Amino acid sequence: MLAAPSIDAFNPPRRILMGPGPSDVYPEVLAAQARPTIGHLDPLFIAMMDELKALIQYAFQTKNEMTLAVSAPGSAGMETCFVNLVEAGEKVIVCRNGVFGERMRQNVERVGATAVMVDNEWGEAVSPADVEAALKAHPDAKFLAFVHAETSTGALSDAKTLCALAKQYDCLSIVDAVTSVGGVELRVDEWGIDAIYAGSQKCLSCVPGLSPVSFSPAAVEKIKSRTTPVQSWFLDQTLVMGYWSGTADNSAKRSYHHTAPVNALYALHESLRILAKEGLEASWQRHADMHQVLRQGLEGLGLKFVVEETCRLPQLNAVYIPEGIDDVAVRKQLLENYNLEIGAGLGALAGKAWRIGLMGFGARRENVALCLKALEEVLN
């Protein structure tokens, strides 16, 4: 028999999280997660789920009935959209201008579908002209998939225009909003987005591990008309929606699918309640304002942005590492001396850029001031 290990309780330090995510979590959200656990079929919990659904609809700006939180992180939200909508042999136009567009391609191919790639340079927004050219060249395409806010570069693409193109060419749109929801303008119904997924740990400033998703009526019809079963049992929305629909009383019994992450859903409920109290437009403006303060300071330090200002995300600031500066050493000093985390570059930007997050609770003046002062001292 193995001996019981002697391990102390884990007590992490208080970090200032200014990387690409997770972001600083609201204190109220941490407190909400510590509330008593109740059953995932308890009438009180079901009533809370109904409120949570309404809050997600507000964050996405949608009336979609099929709106819920997947019990897993944003990557599972991505897979939820692809495995439910796309069937083997179908064709998907996939936009790739960073790491997460590439992950979309992998999802498409794993379900046995064909990915037609529209590539733009890292740091650029998705080109609507290139997308339209691909749609014209492939009239049999069923879907257009793109990342609204590319976390690997800090580039923001024009979701409204891209979704209009999808509609024009009779395609359903699949949109990655993991980093955009709560941080920049996003209007699911007005822009005609058909399937969208997000993450709890970015601009929502919730604990990691949940993925809000929403499907339009047209997307729901596509799911219902499938000729093959959904690849993933756990992510099959035709099964999950029996748990997220109905009423809280006994007149419409919720069907058991899996044991929901009860306390994590408390946390998401609280973070979205905070967003609703602030107001979406106020949140979008706060992120933009803090970005301008950070931008001025970073440029004052001689740092250059990866993304042009016209398509730059306020909540994810990618800057080139100056010549002769050790990437790892700087981030190590920031973490050890200031309890400050910024992100490394991904993919083509690995070792060439830092990613500085201004997300949710983290998008506030004291964080910007600390980041700029700490960077100045370390770089000098």
Image (cartoon, helix red, strand yellow):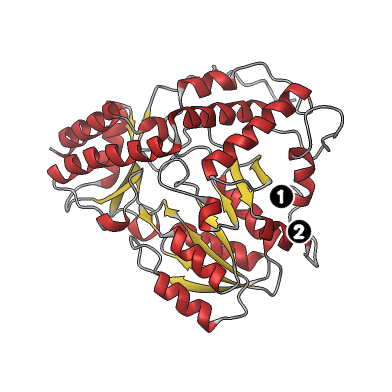
Quarter holding residue 300: top left
Screen quadrant of the N terminus: top right
Label 2 crowd bin: few (<14), some (14–19), many (20+), radius 10 Å: many
Q: Are marks 1 and 2 in contact (CB under 8 Å)?
A: yes
Q: Which kind of residue does numbered mark 1 sit on?
A: Leu
Marker disc for residue 230: 2
Q: Is residue 97 above or below residue 327?
A: below
Q: Nearer the viewer, residue 187 or 344?
A: 187
The answer to whether residue 307 of the structure is visible from this angle is no
Tell me, for residue 161, which label it has, or none: none
Q: In the picture shown, does residue 123 fall above or below 36?
A: below
Which residue is denoted by mark 1 in the rendering? 235
Location of residue 358 with respect to 264 vertically, above or below: below
The image shows residue 307 at horizontal and vertical percentages of 29, 57
Q: Is residue 288 above or below residue 141?
A: above
Q: Position of residue 336 (x, y in %)?
A: 31, 29
Q: Secondary structure at mark 2?
A: loop
Q: Earlier in the sequence, mark 1 or mark 2?
A: 2
- Locate residue 318 relative to residue 79 in the image: left or right: left
Identify the residue at image location x=39%, y=22%.
14
Q: Is residue 135 visible?
A: yes
Q: Name the quarter where the C terminus is drawn.
A: top left
- In percent of the image, x 68 and y 56: which residue is there? 217
